[in-house]
Amino acid sequence: MNLLSNNLVQLVKRNTVVQKIFYSATDERSITTRNNIIYSSLFRGVSMFMGLWMVPLTLNYLNPTKYGIWLTLTSIIAWFNFFDIGLGNGLRNKLAEAFAKKNYEMAKGYVSTTYAILTVIVVVLFVVFILLNKFINWDRLLNVQEVLNEDLSFLMLIVFFFFCFRFVFGLILTILNADQKLAISGFIDLMTAVVSLIGVYIISLTTQESLLLLGVFLSFAPAMVLVIATIWFLQKKYKAIKPSFKYINLKLTKDLTHLSFQFFLLQVVVLLIFFSNNIIIAQLLSPAKVSEFNVVHKYFSIITIVSVLILNPFWTAATDAYYAGDFNWLKKSSSRLIKVWGIISVVTVLMILVSPYVYQIWVKDALQISFRTSLFMGIYVIILSWQNSFVYLINGIGKIRLQLYLYTVMGIAVIPLSYFFIKVLKMGVEGSVMSMIICIIPAAIMIPIQFKLIINEKANGIFNK
């Protein structure tokens, strides 16, 4: 693995564009950020292509309708992530601060308290879900118009059970990210992708079409990988900060939730915007159309994933730079990320142009996808990548109030806009993507302005909160 990683580094170094953007920096913070990008890209890149391979494999095992139902179910479960009240992101910033100060006593307190709070939350959530699940008509909620011979209520219970494990044990990724060990975090994602892909392949060869069986395995695999990773790292590398009843200090909740609560509210509206599409499309069109939307989304998620791979290391580095008063580093990093965005935009345009040929090779005749859906999704990804070039730096700084207000407006607007474009203008799946584009434009304008004010130390009012 080391030989492969070293070869990747040498390949990247020989790329003139990347050399100018990243290898011109010599300070320790930039070098750490650069190495995180390279090594995490190695693992997450492989994970990404495995995810793409999973789509036709799953479509062939199920059918577009059942696949759409599965995607919609997982979108509903994703909404429960906001019940961490933003503690994950709050912990990341607080741990980054503690690691920078080498205060492991403080780090252990934050880790112990966060694990304790999330465990209580997850137990309450599961009990409530058990009580409510039997009263929910999942067939009607998902607009299922055919006999599936599948117990969706039981499937939801199983999926939610394993979600609860991921909810708590996923904190190990937060700890790794706070310690700027994004490559290890990427390796864990890779292991999840490998196990999931192998499992689905075996299921497709040995069993008949079963949404229940597929759902159980795809819920179990990532949960167990996180459990194993948590046990391993907390017993080895992070033994000094592993959770302890003795270090649970509810007084630290105020420190965590001061920033965490804003992250929590931000998560709620972000989930509403980005995970409501599947339910909206299922209700206004059909579950089969959810499959069409998600194939296009998965295709362009290549760009989103690459963008996040580059941006993620800057979050923790920005925290370190801001508390050190190194605004010059923040300015240089922003300049580099804008250049990266330019490259990403060109690649996205090329992906739009070749998308019909890609779909034909990828999913063949399983789905009919319009070019306009790809065009709109590509435009959306370009705008999103531009906005994220500043969002990750601002998240590290912790000035997220403006984002919260902007995304709240977006969250309120996305559903009526989707209805207008899909049902009134009869745009179909393209209408859902168009609503996303309109919703994200205000943030893409205002957030870069906020960042410029912060690094020039001129931010005040809502721009400095």
Image (spheres, rainbow, N blue to C red):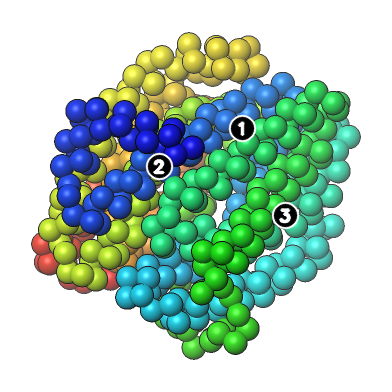
**Badge 3, how many Cα within 10 Å: few under 14, some, many 20+?**
some
Please give left or right for residue 76 compared with residue 252 in the image: right
- The residue where tag 2 is placed is 39
Q: Earlier in the sequence, mark 1 or mark 2?
A: 2
Q: CA distance from mark 1 to mark 3?
A: 23 Å
Secondary structure of the residue carrying numbered label 2: helix
Residue 273 in view in this figure: no
Q: Choose mark 3 or mark 2, whichever is in front.
A: 2
Q: Are marks 3 and 2 in contact (CB under 8 Å)?
A: no
In the rendered structure, which disc, 1 or 3, sits on the residue that comes first in sequence?
A: 3
Query: Where is the C terminus found, in terms of image quarters?
Result: bottom left
For marks 1 and 2, give the one nearer the viewer. 2
The amino acid type found where label 1 is placed reads Val
Q: Which mark is residue 22?
A: none
Q: Which residue occupies 73% across, 27% down?
A: 201
Disc 3 from disc 2: Cα separation: 29 Å
Identify residue for label 3.
162
Residue 27 in picture, x, y percent from top left: 18, 54
Residue 157 appears in which quarter of the rendering?
A: bottom right
